[in-house]
């Protein structure tokens, strides 16, 4: 069996076990499970990190995303990185319940597509392109976390409004914590996506001689950036409140999904993997 | 005989009788001094709280020293026996241990799993130590009871989730604002529950800024207690936009906080949520205020609903707590039995030592060195004692030590 596949599987198993423990703790009364699950998630992240370092050395690219399988596992790694590292100060243990199944699904999909042929991505030798891809993935990961926090916010908001002190009320963090988890990654995501777009322009100019290549992905990304910036400005200026920010984070995420994945189904110069 | 409990509690005994039997520190000291002078009571601890009065003790007699305990009570309280006798419960032996462990675990409390009882038992124990009314056995039992009370709270969720109105208010505030760090609180009316809620919120980190009351004197007194400002019922509205939590508990016959008021306030509050606690009956805040975004309104029934929900979660933990208590009873009995077996075991050890010394002493004449003889003696001693000691330790877990002790005494003439 391919060693890379084994390493990726170990990471997936760690995420899977973390999800099972989170679920067990959520349904039961054992808080300790969340802490162990948290540690398992870190193990999964470290194993994934090792996988990318090994792949990077083997392929000779700084960013080894030359197949759909690697793109999926890199997205999972970005998600874990944003949450475990960038949002270390505001993270909550119970959030793992929603994050670990996403990580697991991404790694399962990555394993499923592992044997598909790799694309000769000569662009990856360009540092511009590498940074463009890396920042875009981190941006999408940040928006995904913002979206997940938005879902949890609306659930907790519903629990508090309906005065139903059920399991979600007991287990989910406060609205304040969840709002931070919506807002903070949204800022990260917006900044990273603007960076990705700017670098993309620079790379496009260097590679093709023009800044703007008009295709669905570019347009959708530009619209996504604008929408997120409008939400951020309205949130910091005051008119938007917690629940509205949560709802808009969900709507913006749909747009982001279209930009990230949906455009794959339309003829586009950004379609690298089939 | 052994351990015993004689007491009354909130389950059967009315507060009027409990009050009459309450032990203040001075009365408790007198009672413990009296008990020390009575041969029927070897050790005694008095636990007296608003929900229970219990005399926990140890006696060498073969029956519960009820007369002596009544004498202790009558020495300190002018209450007729007929008044409290119908409500008395008595536990002896295992039942007494189990009852004490249930008390410290909060399973016998009015509010299941409450923490206060643990401190009250600790205080009663400390008082008994100072009065020298506890010695080795009850001392060990009280230590065990306090430990199991603490273990049950850390290993189960018996004390989790708020159940009193003030603590539910704090829990909800923390679910909205996160950890409270200076959220501004205003209170309308200065009733008992609203003041208790203020105390809890302040204790959790909120900042009580305005006390609104029709009665200026009472309002200023409450405001002074919290380092806040009294404002009149005519001017409170203008401060509404600056606060985060509003507690309403006036005696007004109709709502005084209206939908339009809160709607206007929310426009000025930008992104900050508002938590409204309406503990007045009839209600002070119009119910449909809750339909506004970022406004969370809880009336007294809603708060009780959260409390009941939390209590249900606590009740799920009872079985786990009871199992821990049963194990603690077994462990304590095991310790007691081993303690009782100790004199016989010591005699058995000394009997063995004598025989080994006598029989192995002759080996020195056969050329064995002193060190070798000591080594052989030590190994034989360990091997001979290992099995009986293990058997007795095992038997102590299910009350079978006496059989082995008697057998040792009979077989070896100990």
Image (spheres, coloured by chain):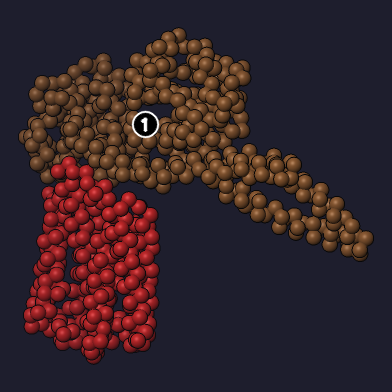
Chain colours: A red, B brown
Name which residue lies at 21% across and 69% down: A140
- The residue lying furthest to the right in this view is B365
> In x, y percent, where is residue B263?
9, 38
Relative to A173, say whether A188 is above or below: below
Q: Nearer the viewer, residue B302 or B358?
A: B358
Q: Is residue B364 found left or right of A35 in the rendered image?
A: right
Name which residue lies at 22% across and 34% down: B304
Relative to A184, say whether B231 is above or below: above
Q: Is residue A179 found left or right of B391 in the rendered image?
A: left
Within 10 Å of the Cα at label 1, are there few (<14), some (14-19), or many (20+) other Cα atoms? many
Q: Nearer the viewer, residue A45 or B329?
A: B329
Q: Is residue B157 found left or right of B125 in the rendered image?
A: left
Relative to B251, say whether B271 is above or below: below
Could you say which quadrant of the image residue B213 lies in?
top left
Position of the C terminus of chain B by quadrant: top right
Could you say which quadrant of the image residue B288 lies in?
top left
Q: Is residue A271 found left or right of B32 in the rendered image?
A: left
Position of the N terminus of chain B by quadrant: top right
Q: Which residue is mark 1?
A: B109
> In x, y percent, where is residue B141?
54, 35
Q: Nearer the viewer, residue A14 or B69?
A: B69
Relative to A62, say whether A229 is above or below: above
Name which residue lies at 26% across and 51% down: A172
* Element carrying mark 1: loop
> In x, y percent, where is residue A266?
7, 80
Name which residue lies at 14% across and 64% down: A253
Q: Confirm whether residue B139 shows in the render.
A: yes
Q: What is the total number of numbered labels drawn onto the structure image?
A: 1
| Chain letter behind tag 1 | B
């Amino acid at each position: 069996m391919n060693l890379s596949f084994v390493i990726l599987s170990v990471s997936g198993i760690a995420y899977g076990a973390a999800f099972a423990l989170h679920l067990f703790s959520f349904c039961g009364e054992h808080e300790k499970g969340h802490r162990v699950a948290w540690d398992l998630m870190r193990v999964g992240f470290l194993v994934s990190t090792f996988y990318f370092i090994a792949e990077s050395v083997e392929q000779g690219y700084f960013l080894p995303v030359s197949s759909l399988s690697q793109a999926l596992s890199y997205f999972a790694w970005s998600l874990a990185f944003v949450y475990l590292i960038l949002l270390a100060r505001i993270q909550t243990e119970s959030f793992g319940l929603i994050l670990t199944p996403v990580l697991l699904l991404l790694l399962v999909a990555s394993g499923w597509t592992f044997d598909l042929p790799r694309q000769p991505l000569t662009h990856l030798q360009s540092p511009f392109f590498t940074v463009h891809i890396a920042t875009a993935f981190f941006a999408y990961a940040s928006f995904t976390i913002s979206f997940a926090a938005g879902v949890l916010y609306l659930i907790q908001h519903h629990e508090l409004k309906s005065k139903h002190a059920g399991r979600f009320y007991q287990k989910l963090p406060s609205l304040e914590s969840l709002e931070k988890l919506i807002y903070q990654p949204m800022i990260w995501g917006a900044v990273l996506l603007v960076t990705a777009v700017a670098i993309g322009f620079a790379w496009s100019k260097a590679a093709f001689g023009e800044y703007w290549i008009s295709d669905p992905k570019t347009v959708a990304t530009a619209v996504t950036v604008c929408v997120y910036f409008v939400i951020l400005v309205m949130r910091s200026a005051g008119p938007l409140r917690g629940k509205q920010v949560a709802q808009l984070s969900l709507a913006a995420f749909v747009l982001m999904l279209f930009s990230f994945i949906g455009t794959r189904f339309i003829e586009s110069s950004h379609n690298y993997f089939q | 005989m052994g351990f015993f409990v004689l007491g009354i509690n909130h389950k059967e005994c009315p507060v009027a009788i409990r009050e009459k039997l309450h032990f203040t520190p001075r009365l408790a000291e007198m009672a413990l001094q009296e008990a020390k002078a009575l041969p029927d009571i070897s050790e005694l601890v008095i636990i007296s709280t608003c929900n229970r009065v219990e005399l926990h003790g140890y006696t060498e007699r073969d029956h519960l020293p009820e007369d002596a305990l009544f004498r202790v009570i009558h020495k300190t309280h002018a209450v007729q026996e007929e008044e409290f006798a119908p409500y008395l419960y008595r536990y002896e032996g295992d039942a007494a241990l189990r009852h004490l462990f249930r008390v410290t675990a909060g399973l016998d409390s009015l509010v299941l799993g409450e923490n206060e009882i643990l401190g009250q038992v600790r205080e009663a124990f400390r008082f008994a130590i100072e009065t020298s009314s506890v010695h080795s056995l009850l001392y060990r039992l009280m230590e065990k009871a306090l430990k199991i009370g603490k273990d049950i709270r850390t290993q189960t969720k018996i004390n989790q989730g708020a159940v009193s109105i003030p603590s539910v208010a704090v829990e909800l505030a923390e679910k909205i604002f996160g950890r409270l760090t200076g959220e501004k609180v205003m209170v309308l009316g200065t009733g008992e529950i609203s003041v208790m809620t203020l105390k809890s919120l302040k204790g959790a980190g909120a900042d009580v800024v305005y006390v609104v009351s029709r009665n200026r004197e009472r309002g200023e007194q409450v405001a002074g207690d919290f380092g806040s400002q009294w404002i009149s019922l005519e001017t409170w509205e203008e401060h509404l936009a600056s606060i985060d939590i509003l507690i309403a508990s006036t005696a007004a016959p109709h709502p005084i906080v209206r939908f339009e008021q809160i709607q206007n306030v929310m426009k000025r509050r930008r992104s900050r949520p508002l938590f409204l606690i309406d503990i007045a009956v009839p209600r002070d805040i119009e119910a449909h205020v809750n339909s506004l975004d970022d406004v969370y309104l809880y009336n007294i029934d809603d708060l009780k609903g959260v409390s009941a929900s939390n209590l249900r979660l606590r009740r799920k933990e009872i079985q786990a707590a009871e199992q821990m208590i049963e194990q603690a009873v077994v462990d304590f009995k095991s310790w007691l039995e081993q303690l009782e077996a100790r004199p016989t075991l010591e005699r058995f050890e000394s009997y063995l030592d004598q025989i080994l010394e006598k029989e192995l002493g002759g080996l020195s004449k056969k050329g064995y060195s002193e060190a070798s003889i000591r080594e052989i003696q030590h190994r034989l001693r360990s091997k001979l004692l290992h099995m009986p000691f293990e058997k007795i330790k095992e038997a102590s877990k299910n009350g079978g030590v006496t059989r082995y002790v008697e057998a040792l005494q009979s077989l070896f003439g100990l």
